[in-house]
Amino acid sequence: MSKKITNQFICSRMMLPEHKEKLNSHRKSILKKEKYSKPCFDEQRLEEFQFLLNHSMHNKITVKITVLNDNEYLNIEGIVKKMDLISRKITLITEEELKIIDSKSIVDIKPA
């Protein structure tokens, strides 16, 4: 009995096709959530992010910010115009427009 429980595909012959599809879609959604999860940063990495943002703001240097947005990664390049520490928002000057980024959604910051 325990062999059936541990190996799901042995007993899958007895499952309805609708149940198999639902089980596979559930498994894919779990893998998608794990793939696009926000990493935990240590203090050294956060200080590096802060240094890059300050350096961009004061010296007008372009940075590349990777943001997690609804199960996809977006890369935004621009110069930091303003950092609001209270609301934790960063304002970037990109080629097209001003973009406001929430610092909670930032995954990576690199110099461009």
Image: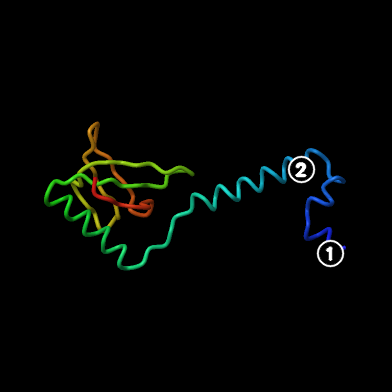
Q: Which residue is mark 1?
A: 2
Q: Tell me which amino acid carries mark 2.
A: Lys
Q: Image check: 78 left or right of 75?
A: left
Q: How many marks?
A: 2
Counting residues from the start of the chain, the first of labels 2 and 1 encountered is 1
Quarter of the image that includes the N terminus: bottom right
Which mark is in front, 2 or 1?
1
The span from disc 2 to disc 1 (Cα, nearest Å) is 20 Å
At which x and y percent is residue 20?
76, 43
Mark 1 neighbour class, 10 Å CA radius: few under 14, some 14 to 19, many 20 or more: few
Taking the view exactly as shown, the residue that stands out farthest to the top is 96
At which x and y percent is residue 103?
33, 53
SS label for mark 2: helix
* CB atoms of marks 2 and 1 within 8 Å: no
Q: Which residue is mark 2?
A: 20
At which x and y percent is residue 98?
24, 38
